[in-house]
Amino acid sequence: MNWEAIALTGRLAMIVAGALVLVGLPIAYWISFSRWRWKFLIEALVSVPLVLPPTVLGFYLLVAFGSGSWFGKWWQSITGHTLAFSFQGLVIASIIYSLPFAVQPFAASFAAVDPALLSVSSTLGASRWHTFWRVILPLSVPGVVTGVVLSFAHTVGEFGVVLMIGGNIPGVTRTVSIDIYDRVQAIEYASANQTALVLLIFAFAVLSIVYALNRRIWAVYPFK
Amino acid sequence: MKFDVPSKLEANTLDSALHVQIRREYCGGDRDATFSLDVNFRVPSGITMLFGPSGAGKTTVLDCIAGVRSPDSGRIELAEQTLFESAVQINIRAEIRRIGYVFQSLALFPHLTAEQNIHYGLFKLPVAERRRRAAAILDSLHIAHLRNRRPRGISGGERQRVALARALVTQPKALLLDEPLSALDAATKAGIMDDLRAWNEQHRIPVLYVTHSREEVFALGERVIALEQGRVVAEGTPLQVLSAPRTEAIAGWMGLENIFDAEVLALHEKQGTMLCRLASAAGAGPELEIPLGRSTAGDRVRVGIGAGEILIATRVPEGISARNVLQGELKTIERRDAMLIAKVDSGILFEVHLTPGAQESLQLVAGKRVWLVIKTYSCHLLQRTSRELL
């Protein structure tokens, strides 16, 4: 069992899930309530990682992180090193890759809030900001939890993007899935199986939580 | 006996009135069809009923006033302040209009207790003031015992009170009610309306109450605006609107052709009836026994009787269950389609509908002496006019 890889994966997934709450909530809010006619383009863009082969996403991120792009240059001028093959690069890639897994459940639960509650909130003098914190978010707790859990789990399980932009540096970018791949390549089936089994059990547990939450939607907040 | 006329209200409260003059396309009951709303009316302080069939545009009007939706064009003014004016592109946001709005669905926040719901609109106030105001409104609407309950755990009538309290506690400059009581029984309804009237006697704001129920118009309203397919078709007191030219909307109210003001003389609680004297222009009219209402002797009430529910006899009827037999003189009788409309004077003018066959066999002609037979339960108690018109 490679505890270093497991710890690294856990750290990565937690940071990504946390970042996706900050990034995903405003995007989901905008998708739920904007009346912009070209909104569907943004919705499609957010969901692209769902259907794209991870290698395609990884390839373009690698290009963007490289010193040939303005972003890569800018990052290098600030931090002194390149994003490719670094933990930070992995974090950014994972945020993009897991974005739909956070935004979709967030947006679905925002859209499910009775619009009359939002109208009545505004007639009671509440700004949109206030309404979001006092009405929309409390009523969307199951959806937000689902989004966080799914993006955490998805980050734990990603492989292609990590391989493309992270490489295989122990303690820096060698995640659990890369570790398993490594061991299979080295014909260490027994240790590969150990780690794989842990991931399998983890994935099952996480999805059980998600489905249980959505079945009894008020499992977290016992009301309505 | 003289009765107060509601128009008396308007003189000293001009400044708090709501003026609405708007146009808007809207979807009626039928999803595919769009209608155009084009209305122009004024709501003085007091309770005004916005009456009309479903799809008439009533909710659209309320949404535009509250600022939840915007009209295509026009002007909305409240207490001499412009809330919306398309010509100069004024459109005050809903959250600063200070208009209380009780939705048809009530829209209570399911995750908050009754008290937290009521606190919701007071978040800008200091906590102590918030508590004071919430406690006052909880008391005056008799829901203090519900303060820690969530909306799901309380009954329909109590939920209405919570929603009303949540709107009133913000001290709005106008109150909009979208069929808030339609699902409640008459007694619960009357109790809530009494509390609302009591509150409004202190605050004197315009209250616009949307309904499609004729009974509510008579029972609750001081004033009516009748809306049909996006147009105002009649406006005035319930009585005035009834006597206005017949339109499709008003025809719906016509189930009660005879509407009289009356004074309660005595209550017979055991029999479930009360005796009242109808007020005619000439003075005291005939006495009628009507179903017991929430009244005391001396109260002024309004009684409605369907013209088709009154029997005409040419001799003194005997051995019948009907409690009211009034002697009178047949003044006129005229034909409308397959029906005859008789006007009978028995101290006050009654309209009676009968068939041509009945006229033939009784040989009814103008000037004939007749007796009107009216069952107690054919008399509908419409409105208590004693307190609300002060």
Image (spheres, rainbow, N blue to C red):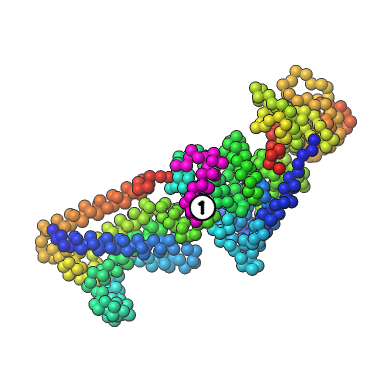
Q: In front here: B146 or A113? A: B146
Q: Is residue B151 visible?
A: no
- Whole-percent x and y of residue B139? 54, 41
Residue for point 80% across, 26% down: B326
Residue pointed to by mark 1: B121
Report helix, strand or loop for mark 1.
helix
Amino acid type indicated by mark 1? Gly
- Whole-percent x and y of residue B118? 50, 48
- Residue range of the region highlighted in magenta in the rendering: B119-148
Q: In front here: B66 or B311? A: B66
Q: Main secondary structure of the magenta part?
A: helix
Q: Residues within 10 Å of mark 1 (few under 14, many from 20)?
A: many
Quadrant holding the C terminus of chain A: top left
User: Going by the image, does B223 lie left or right of A29?
Assistant: right
Q: Is residue B264 visible?
A: yes
Q: What is the residue that sits farthest to the bottom in this orientation?
A: A68
Residue for point 41% across, 63% down: A26
Residue for point 69% across, 47% down: B224
